[in-house]
Amino acid sequence: MSGPIISDDPLYQLLRDDDVTGFNQAREAGQECDLSGCDLRGLDLRNLIIKGMNLEDTYFRGADLRGIDFSGCNLNGASLADAKISGCYFPIELTPAEIELSVTMGTRLRHIYTKT
């Protein structure tokens, strides 16, 4: 695994431009987006709808993730260091200890993802 990716994907660029509403509307319209390995550090992502997305190796360091539903997402290798996570719904396979280690110590999540 290498460092975070700055993708050319138009939906990813919406997030980099703080347009969570535009991202959600595009996803609801059926547009696909691969955020795996992407750099989402320090972004305000509240109200982001990403249920079921592949977020493997994604960097969320210092991001505001409050209230996001991560159920059905592949979070293997994702980093939550210093992220705001209150009110998040994480996949049941991730233990609270695993999440806490990622937020406080910067460890990468070890998530055995099974697509449903």
Image: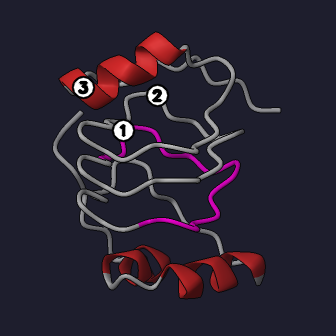
Give the Cα separation between the discs numbered 2 and 3: 17 Å
Circle 1 residue: 57
Would residue 31 be found to the left or right of residue 54 on screen? right
Choose top left, top right, bottom left or bottom right for residue 31.
bottom right
Residue at position x 44%, y 11% in the image: 97
The residues colored magenta run 45-59
Coloration of the structure image: secondary structure
Q: Earlier in the sequence, mark 2 or mark 3?
A: 2
Q: Main secondary structure of the magenta part?
A: loop
Q: Is residue 79 above or below residue 69?
A: above
Where residue 30 appears, x then y in whole percent?
A: 76, 77
Circle 2 residue: 76
Would residue 105 be found to the left or right of residue 114 on screen? left
Circle 3 residue: 104
Give the Cα separation between the discs numbered 1 and 2: 6 Å
Please name the amino acid that badge 3 sits on. Answer: Thr
Q: Quadrant where the C terminus lies?
A: top right
In contact (CB < 8 Å): disc 1 and disc 2: yes
Please name the amino acid that badge 2 sits on. Answer: Asn
Residue at position x 36%, y 38% in the image: 57
| Residue 105 magenta-highlighted | no
In contact (CB < 8 Å): disc 3 and disc 1: no
Q: Quadrant where the N terminus lies?
A: top left
In contact (CB < 8 Å): disc 2 and disc 3: no
Dot 3: element: helix
Dot 1: element: loop
Q: Is residue 57 above or below residue 60?
A: above
Q: Earlier in the sequence, mark 1 or mark 2?
A: 1
